[in-house]
Image: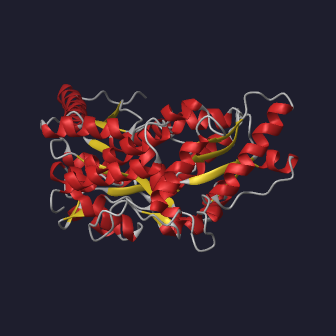
Amino acid sequence: MAAPRPSRARRAGRAGRAVAVVTALATLMLAQAASAATLRIACSALGQERVLCEQGARAWAAETGHTVDLVAIPNSATERLGLYQQLLSAGAGDIDVLQIDVVWPGLLAEHLVDLGPVLGGQAGDHLGALVANNTVDGRLVAMPWFIDMGLLYYRADLLDAHGLDVPETWAELTETARAIQEAERAAGNSDLWGFVWQGRAYEGLTCNALEWIASHGGGTVVAPDGAITVDTPQAAAALDRAAGWVGTISPPGVLNYAEEEARGLFQAGNAAFMRNWPYAWALAQGDDSPVRGKVGVVPLPAGPAAPDDQPAATLGGAQLAVSRYSAHVNEAIDLVRHLTSAEEQTRRAVQGSFNPSRPALYTAPEVLSAVPILVDMRPALDYAVARPSTVTGTRYNQVSTAIFTGVHRVLSGQADGAAGVAAIAARVQRIKRGGW
């Protein structure tokens, strides 16, 4: 027997409820679409940085329903800072989340959101020195993302082939690089150079110069008490030594090298030694790298009076900050939370050799397995040298410009070391104008 047919009223009721459900779902979807934000994040494209940043941002977007666009910015730290200052000074909301250098919190603080109320509880999981560095007048203006320091990369296969040891002083590096370069060229490898580094007139040269000067016992240009200390025989000798590399163990073009130019030459197999940041490790070990399995990493060399003179490694790294002029401050803060999380920092360490700012991850088996150079980096942490950004405050950019401009003059043969450090000291004194 056939089931009784629903009455017209019941059929109308069901149809009405179906319409209501569809309407509710459509309303919910429209509300979600209306509340979805499009954020813009500025990430460096140095090495794998852009790819890893984009992957992390896309994962957050997939979880939250928001959209993230990446903004193209210069790889040069100096040019990037200039761009940020131009946009922020105009109150432009073009960028919501900014990747900033370790020396920029004091320079940009007035334009950045205080992350403390939301992320302050997580800040204790990061390296304390970086949290302190990112706290300006009690405001946490950036969260640590990864840390950096200068390291010496070497071709282990070339050292073995020529029966040479890893150099421990700058003098040993100079002689070892020269010996390998001469022997390889005599054997027909005419493209090989001994040592590549960052010699362009930009922030990267300031980092290199501080390592040379500090390891020679010449201090940090500006002392923590604000005194200008660069005009010394030790600092002059350090710059004269570096100038002697240009055209001998380093290509003349090194005067225009930033990180990627140095890495490109080294990774192509055309340099025995390289000074660079940790990011270069993963790329050197990539499947398509000609030097895969042939590279070692150690702390940078010490000065001429070793063991009294110690190595020096300029402390670097990136932080993430939120612009005060963002139209989506809450969403931007949440993106920063995600990108600086333990899970994301682990992924970046494993895939790109980016050193976590969370100390707990340095003992994580997954991280150590993927980034064995962390073991070699630990001694370098003891020799980390901070740039004089805290004491010079908002004038640090001017001070750094004075440093790299003066050092570049020495490297290019326009001045000797003594004249170079005297000129740097005089220019920094004018910047100081009686007080910082």
All told, the count of numbered labels is: 0
Q: Describe residue 42's horizontal placement relative to residue 356 as left or right.
A: left
Residue pictured at 45% horizontal, 56% vertical: 210
Residue pictured at 61% horizontal, 34% vertical: 247
Residue pictured at 32% horizontal, 46% vertical: 402
| Location of residue 292 by image quarter | top right
Residue 141, horizontal then vertical, whole percent? 24, 57
Residue 95, horizontal then vertical, whole percent? 25, 37
Q: Does residue 221 appear in this view?
A: yes
In front of the other: 319 or 161: 161
| Location of residue 183 by image quarter | top right
Q: Quadrant of the C terminus?
A: bottom left
Q: Quadrant of the N terminus?
A: top left
| Location of residue 309 by image quarter | bottom right
Q: Which colour scheme appears in the figure?
A: secondary structure
Q: Does residue 60 appear in this view?
A: no
In front of the other: 283 or 156: 156
Residue 123, horizontal then vertical, whole percent? 34, 66
In front of the other: 321 or 58: 321
Q: Describe residue 54's horizontal placement relative to residue 113 as left or right.
A: right
Instruction: Spot the residue most to the bottom.
Output: 308
Residue 261, horizontal then vertical, whole percent? 55, 33
In front of the other: 338 or 320: 320
Residue pictured at 19% horizontal, 33% vertical: 34
> Is residue 72 shown above or below 63?
above
